[in-house]
Image: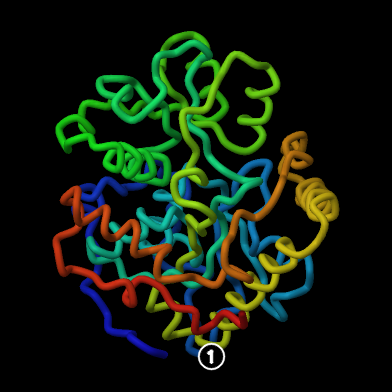
Amino acid sequence: MANTARLKPVSRRSLLRWGLAATATGTVLSGCSAGAASPAGETKVVRYQGWSGDVLYPELAADLGLLGDLRLEWIGNTTSGPQDIQATVTGDIDIGGAFNGAIVRLIAAGAPIRAVVGYYGADADTLAGYYALEGSPIRGPRDFIGKKVGVNTLGAHHEDVLAIYLEQGGLSEEEIRSVQLVVVPPVSAEQALRSGQLDVSVLSDIRREKAIARGGIQPVFTDFDLLGAFTAGCYVLREEFIAANPTTTRTLVAGVARAVHWAQTRPREEVAARFTEIIRRRGRNEDTSSVPYWRSTGVAGPGGRIADREFGTWLERSVKDGRVPPGRLDVARLYTNEFNPF
């Protein structure tokens, strides 16, 4: 495998410094984990965190019979992408996913992980919009100065996309810092906007569609308007896991890639129906009402194949804002398509 040089182990202090410490502790497991490779051979159990009311591509891959003799072990739900990949770093889980910019910063902090396949992004059907109330004076970049913007988590997709939008609009770093980011759970984002607690709120997926249907809001811009179609987030594995479990890694990543490709190429209604059945069968007492609003994977590359641009954009931004020292990383260190059949 190319470029397998190890970085020094990441410390909790480093994670806190880079703003990526876990926001929940419920997933911490004992040091003797089920996912660790045994002396007798490679692990066949892959631990992961889920999302309530959503189907992850490893789960779809298992349902489609694409994981061979591997078994997934769900250990609970995550609270955010940054938390999910930190849990991967600490060994609490084996595979996690997050926004590519968060992956960049965690690797820069010393985390020995590698992105292996893309799983979400933006296209004409699936996007994140930055919405203001109808009649709001916020129409362009300079109108954001001093305003409150609701995002789902800090150090992730919505924050970095906004920074690029403001930078391209000519704002100085000081003016960009004047924009107040407020962490708001996605389920509360629309109400916080309508009640005047926020000047702009980021809305995506079903919540964006429902908010638009209710009227009274207007988009200032979307991530798709700004950057075109792109894969925004990837699943990562620890380099230690890859080295100890090369066959398992290949089976897992290939299965996930084929599941992404299946969702990319099947009719939307078929994908949504499959997701609904998976959620119902797994018995976690979840609401499936949002699944019919699924529009697309948003993944740009076939089967989640990763392109340089999908990390280069965020690496450049992280260097500009001082969160990654110049020269610390190159794009080739951040991801690999080695295990992806596409």
Nearest to the observer: residue 216 or residue 250: 216
Nearest to the observer: residue 150 or residue 248: 150
Q: Residue at x 57, y 82 (%)?
A: 248
Residue 288 image-quadrant placement: top right
Please tell me how many numbered marks the rendered image carries.
1
Residue 101 image-quadrant placement: bottom left
Circle 1 packing at 10 Å, graded few (<14), some (14-19), many (20+), is few
Q: Residue at x 52, y 27 (%)?
A: 219
Colouring scheme, one of rainbow, by chain, secondary structure, one colour: rainbow
Nearest to the observer: residue 172 or residue 75: 172
Q: Residue at x 57, y 49 (%)?
A: 76
Three-letter code for the amino acid on which mark 1 is drawn: Ala
Can residue 205 be seen?
Answer: yes
Say left or right for 276 vs 31: right
* Quarter of the image with the C terminus in it: bottom right
Q: Residue at x 41, y 17 (%)?
A: 198
Say left or right for 133 vs 258: left
Can residue 281 be seen?
Answer: no
Q: Position of residue 42 (x, y in %)?
A: 54, 85
Say left or right for 325 vs 77: left
Tell me the SS state at disc 1. Answer: loop
Which residue has dot 1 on it?
A: 40
Q: Position of residue 11 (x, y in %)?
A: 22, 59
Residue 113 image-quadrant placement: bottom left
Whether 267 is drawn above or below 182: the answer is below
* Quarter of the image with the N terminus in it: bottom left
Q: Position of residue 56 (x, y in %)?
A: 64, 56
Nearest to the observer: residue 30 or residue 99: 99
Q: Position of residue 96 (x, y in %)?
A: 49, 60
